[in-house]
Amino acid sequence: MISTERVSTELVSTNPWDNSELWRGPIATPATIAAALASARAAVADWSHTPDLRASVITRLGELLKSHADELATLISRETGKVLWEARLEVAAMANKCPLSIRAEHERRSPTTSPAGAITYRPHGVALVLGPFNFPGHLPLGHIAPALLAGNTVLFKPSEKTPATAEFLARLLHLAGLPPGVLQVLHGGAAVATQLIDSDINAVLFTGSLPVATQILSRLTRRPGVLTALELGGNNPLIAWDIQNTPAAVLHILQSAFATSGQRCSCARRLILPRSSSNTALLPMLTAAALALRTGPWNAEPQPFFGPLIDAPAAAHTLSVARTLLQSGATALTPVPDRLAHPALLPPMLLDATHCPRSDVEVFGPLLQLHFAESFEHALSLANATSYGLVSGLLSDNPALWDTFRRTARAGVLTLNRPTTGASSELPFGGIGNSGNHRPSAYFAADYCSHPVAEMSSPALQLPPTLPPGLTLTTND
């Protein structure tokens, strides 16, 4: 049977709060993908031999990000629903990412020499960057800037939910002096991503979910020469144990669980508390503070703590998970609504899931599951009971617990008395297990954007003082 359903050739981006249209443009076709790839391939030779120009472009981009900060922050807020104060922090992080990427490229990938030979670094060629929606500027730039600095050209497929931000970033890059063909934006959903992965690219740099990452890897099974850097999610634990400053602990828990409406891969999904009465004030204070969190549209005054999720299906999925937990024996410490006043806006939800069957999934929304532990060793066991390994956090005033935690916790990012969402671009950011493939980003992104070449050389062609046993050379002298 031939389907009569019309296939859309256009992508439309809307504001998740009021569904107002922000941007529309064509979805990439096989022909446009082929043309973009050919252009990117042709640009590699010149671009890879211009290190000064590459650094100049990224430096200039940082300046443009600062001068266009208000405009870009407003666009990010409107396209993602992210509240304006947080979108401004994202743009500031983008501007800071530029000089940091230049420094990382210099410090981690500069050529070196030794008596054994030399080590130089070469770009992969054409790099495919697949971006997420939650930080539509900062996270793609964390791949794009180091990839360009290393001499790669880039095909950038942003999330189909945030194309306008991607177009804005590309426009700033070209204003910064990026030559034609070096970076091209291709819009679309999973079908376009698949076509791009199947094309003649040299690297895939991806930030997103585990299910999509497994699909990427399955398509590259027979292509080991394609470098793959995966920055994935987590079922992140946060242990609160032996606490003196309860208000500070509550603040860090709220920031860990509910920043960006819970739509950060570093958000705490599980809170682990002692069963004993050592923190009797914590849970009531946390519950009251969660109930008092202000939510609303991106431009509300006074500013909310968080806004809507990226769209109504995302909110519906998170709410469905919360209801399933309640059916499985969880207790709601904050209300789980029967109906939503706004289809994409959820309240912060805190559930005691101690007696629920263990579920090891990443829930990308404002849902925090509470678990009680009988001892700190039990708490560590609960924290490590996940196939993910992105972030693991501890709130405690006991230095001995941190010493045990930092040696035992299974994660690529460990935090003490800090929100789990407070990642630093100055450090590696990436996880183990189902949270990544051991190619951390942030400062270490420079490492996966080029490959080392060993050079062993001699200034002249000459015979050694002695020949290997069994080998004779006859000369005409």
Image (spheres, grey):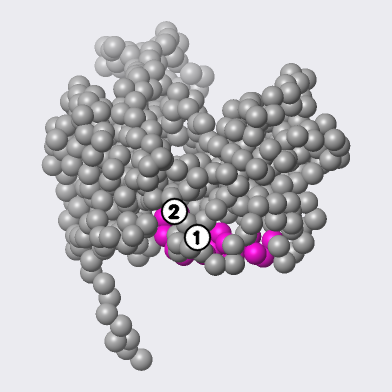
Residue 130 seen in the current view: no
Which of the marked residues, 1 or 2, is nearer the chain's N terminus?
2
Give the residue type at disc 2: Pro
Residue placed furthest toward the bottom: 1
In the image, is residue 303 above or below residue 208? above
Which label was assigned to residue 308? 2
Q: Residue at x 60, y 33 (%)?
A: 251
Give the residue type at disc 1: Ala
- Please provide percent x and percent y for residue 356: 76, 58
Q: Which residues are magenta?
A: 309-325
Q: Residue at x 37, y 46 (%)?
A: 300
Q: Distance from label 1 to label 2 (Cα)?
A: 8 Å
Pointer 1 and pointer 2: residues touching (CB < 8 Å)? yes
Numbered label tally: 2
Q: Which residue is mark 1?
A: 315
- Between 387 and 222, which is closer to the camera in this rendering? 387
